[in-house]
Image (cartoon, helix red, strand yellow):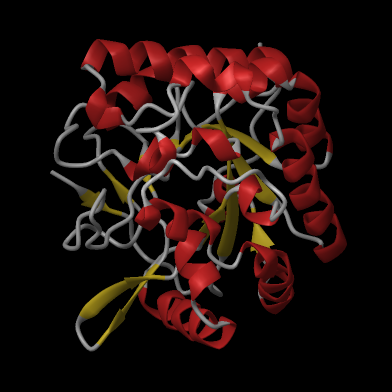
Amino acid sequence: MLLKMQPTESAPRFAMSIDVEDYFQVWAFSKVIDRASWDGFSPRVAAATRRALDLFDRTGTKATFFTLGWVAERHPELIRDIIGRGHELASHGYDHAKVFDQTLDGFREDAGRTKSLLEDIAGVEVIGYRAPGFSIGGRTPWAHEVLAELGYRYSSSAHPIAHDHYGDPNGERAPYSPVAGRAFVEAPVATAEIFGRRISCAGGGWFRAAPYAVSKRLIDRACKSIGGPVIFYFHPWEVDPGQPRIRTAPLKSQLRHYINLSRMEPKLERLLADYRWERVDEALGFTRASTAA
């Protein structure tokens, strides 16, 4: 049974998040780029993530960085920079494998390994998790319980819309407690409803494709109806318009990935100025994670 969290009457809260992965690690290219070849690509994730960090510094934004363990192993200085600038470090799994493509035991190993790895590098407790490709749902009824057992306090792995790769258009839009007897929260990313249809206003390709005024209107609508924080996300490669092109990928995947990359950073700067953005853990009412043992 899902236990809904009670909405509060306080001012709306807005949580900014960034899924830290490199341009060649995205799911849209997974059919043409094998994981075994990743080390053969020239990495751009550290520079792109620091571009986002500088943007956050300019706008007074705090955010949550859901980070691949694969990236953290190769760029430990980036992880320490994220922490040093006052942001939350959270887990995005080790190598971007979707949860529904893993066994229960495989998922436990992946999520536990990544949590320990991030904590060892950063020296802080990691309490948040986001599934690659928003891949926690009906096919993974065990996932939230595994995360709770591993010591995570929340997940932001649900994108409750109709989509060809993920999502549940009938899923909860507000934070809820999916594990009976445990203080564990699932916090879906932001959606709005227009004429009975649910639309994403959580970021990513939707934000890059839509006019800014449309995105803002949807976010304003979401903050009045979700009953929890409006959670937005993007990726470092979205503020890196100079990244190499993967021409072997399907045209649909290329369109989704490359659309309006050059316009993303200015749009983000407007968004960050229009709302007060904070870390996901703090928007959900958690205190800042303690120093790891």
Horizontal side of 137 relative to 188 (left or right) equals left
In this rendering, would 144 be left or right of 281?
Answer: left
Please tell me which residue is depicted at 51% across the width and 33% down the height of the picture: 25
x%, y% of residue 233?
Answer: 53, 55
Q: Quadrant of the C terminus?
A: top right
Name the spot of residue 20 as percent of width and height, x first: 60, 38
Above or below: residue 101 compared with residue 258: above
Q: Nearer the viewer, residue 283 or 156?
A: 156
The percent coordinates of residue 23 (x first, y second) are 58, 40
Residue 202 visible from this viewpoint: no
Q: Please give the name of the residue rendered at 40% of the width and 32% of the height, measured from the top-left corner.
A: 32
Q: How many marks?
A: 0
- Position of residue 271 relative to residue 165, above or below, is below
- Spot the residue most to the front: 248
Residue at the spot x=49%, y=78% of the render?
Answer: 210
Judge by depth and name the residue closer to the eye, 173 or 56.
56
- The quarter of the rendered structure image containing the N terminus is top left
- Please tell me in which quadrant of the rendered image residue 239 appears: bottom right
Q: Name above or below for residue 145 compared with residue 173.
A: above
Residue 159, image x, y percentages = 33, 55
Question: Who's the residue at 45% across and 53% down the image?
Answer: 254
| Residue 210 visible in the displayed image | yes
